[in-house]
Image: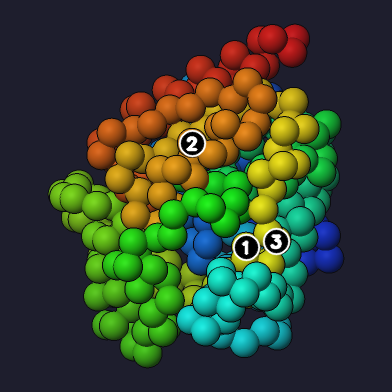
Amino acid sequence: MLAHQPPQIAHANGIDICYEIFGDPAAEPLLLIMGLGAQMIHWDDDFCRQLAGRGFRVIRFDNRDIGKSSHLTGGKRLTPFELLKQRFLKIPVASTYRLIDMAKDTVGLMDALGIQSAHLVGASMGGMIAQEIALSFPQRVRSLTSIMSTTGNPKIPAPTREAAAVLMAPPPTSKEEYFARFAKTWKVLRVGSFPEDEALDPARAARTYERGLNPAGVGRQLRAVLASGSRKERLAQVKTPTLVIHGTVDPLVRPEGGKDTAASIPGAKLLMIEGMGHALPIPMWPQIIDAIDKHAHGAAAKAA
């Protein structure tokens, strides 16, 4: 049985961060960074255990403003009008913090855990945070895996209307509405039918709900993404071994986002997963886990 440390709190970068560790304490450290409005449990327990089984010390955590990590204050709900002003008039979105602050949270967590450097795997906004760490703290990153993420390049096609509606929908007002919204959101983001995941959705929704929702925090995270601008030019400086994974039918961060990331980072490898949307569905785990395993262990062997 693989070692498992239940969730704990670390004080890092002036906030509290809730984290959990799977796997052997002596194994290669691998940090999983989740996306916008998503708690650490969106890295499924079994997904984490399978990665730990490949010889990693897997650490997942709640970003600031989500789950059991510190909830901040300030900032108003983002309006479609503000988004239009940003897209067409290039008027920047105001934000309480930016992706660099979330990058510093992650590095602070590594400090608290005594981890000098780690393999980073980021999904969606988590991929943006991981890119920012590779740019600002390159010595802390052994390898970078950016999943269903992008460079912030404004030329990337916008989300589909359906995916944008999911992102901008007002927060649910009751538990029942939350459960219905959860199922609908993931149906839109997964694109297509994934019965194994759909069967788990009610339990996943319940667990997320019980850990606590923070709609205002999700709004602040979205502002952080938009206020941070494009990393495209800076990504040319990244020397970290990089793998980019993206779904061919992603409705939220379009496939061009992944392709642009891989094209912007020297030597990056690109893996396009056929039929994958903006989610990590169970049938696609073997392909994703194999790719992360090969990439991270390959980078570690080269560095040794």
Q: In what element is the residue under mark 1? A: helix
Crowding at mark 1 (Cα within 10 Å: few <14, some 14-19, many 20+): many
Q: Residue at x 72, y 42 (%)?
A: 233
Task: For mark 2, give the secondary structure.
Answer: helix
Q: Is residue 59 visible?
A: no
Residue furthest to the front: 89
- The amino acid at mark 2 is Lys
Q: Is residue 262 above or below residue 181?
A: above
Residue that mark 1 sits on:
225
Residue drawn at 28 percent across, 33 percent down = 274
Q: Which residue is mark 2?
A: 259
Find numbered disc 3 in the image and state the secondary structure of the residue it sits on.
loop
**Decide: marks 3, 1 in contact (CB < 8 A)?**
yes
Residues at marks 2 and 1, CA–CA distance in whole angstroms: 19 Å
- Judge left or right: residue 57 versus residue 215: right
Which of the two marks, 2 or 1, is nearer to us in this view? 2
Instruction: Give amino acid for label 3.
Output: Ser
Query: Which residue shows up at 82% across the image and 40% down it?
Result: 137
Whole-number angstrom distance, CA of label 2 to CA of label 3: 20 Å
